[in-house]
Image (cartoon, rainbow, N blue to C red):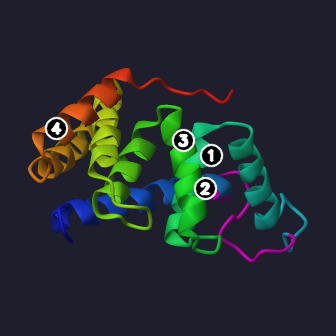
Amino acid sequence: MGIMPTHVVAQFCSTLRAVLFVWLAEGMIAGTNPAGAIDDAPDGRGYSATEQLQRFREDAEEGSALAQYVLGVMHQLGEAVPQDHIEAAKWLHRAADQGLALAQFVLGGMRVNGHNVPEDVVRAHIWLDLSAAHAARIAGARKLTRDAQEMRAALAGKMTAAEIEEAQKLARDWKPKPER
């Protein structure tokens, strides 16, 4: 798959599915079933998956970076919502712009080979650089830090010195854009 080694692609997909699993598990623990039929809860308890998804979308619209990330992943994978790569990129970008390391990693990976977004090695390098830097400050995020660093290093091997310099400058100048 171009620049990304096969094991990194597998880890990337595994990470996306793991985050989605956490969201679905949270719904089950809370007494709802977000993966269930999209209609009213049959026993009258809780609320429907449609209502939960709507609440989740509202949180994303109100600026929750985590809700934006998970909604982006859901659209990327076609899990609980129709697969829509444009929606996925929109939500992931909003989360990444706020500084969410995992969203930055996913966007960097998408940009490396133009996976449902225009290929852009400079933007890919920026997002991977930011992801590695942000993840390094999070307890328990060593794997994300290492994966972002490895993907960025593999990408840098395919870039010109001028492209790397531009990406590094843009990453240094980057500022989060909080929505809340």
Quarter that holds the N terminus? bottom left
> What amino acid is at disc 2?
Leu
Of callouts 2 and 4, the N-terminal one: 2
Question: Residue at label 3?
Answer: 95
- Asked whether the viewer can see residue 144, the reply is yes
Secondary element at image label 1: helix
Report crowding for label 4: few under 14, some 14 to 19, many 20 or more residues within 10 A (C-alpha): few
Q: Nearer the viewer, residue 149 or 49?
A: 149
> What amino acid is at disc 3?
Ala
Question: Residue at label 2?
Answer: 71
Report crowding for label 2: few under 14, some 14 to 19, many 20 or more residues within 10 A (C-alpha): many
> What amino acid is at disc 1?
Ala
Is 152 on the left or on the right of 43, as rendered? left
- Whether residue 29 is situated above or below residue 180 in the rendered picture: below
Q: Which residues are magenta?
A: 28-40
Residue at image coords 84%, 60%: 47
Q: CA distance from mark 1 to mark 3?
A: 8 Å
Residue 124, horizontal then vertical, whole percent: 31, 48
Q: CA distance from mark 2 to mark 1?
A: 6 Å
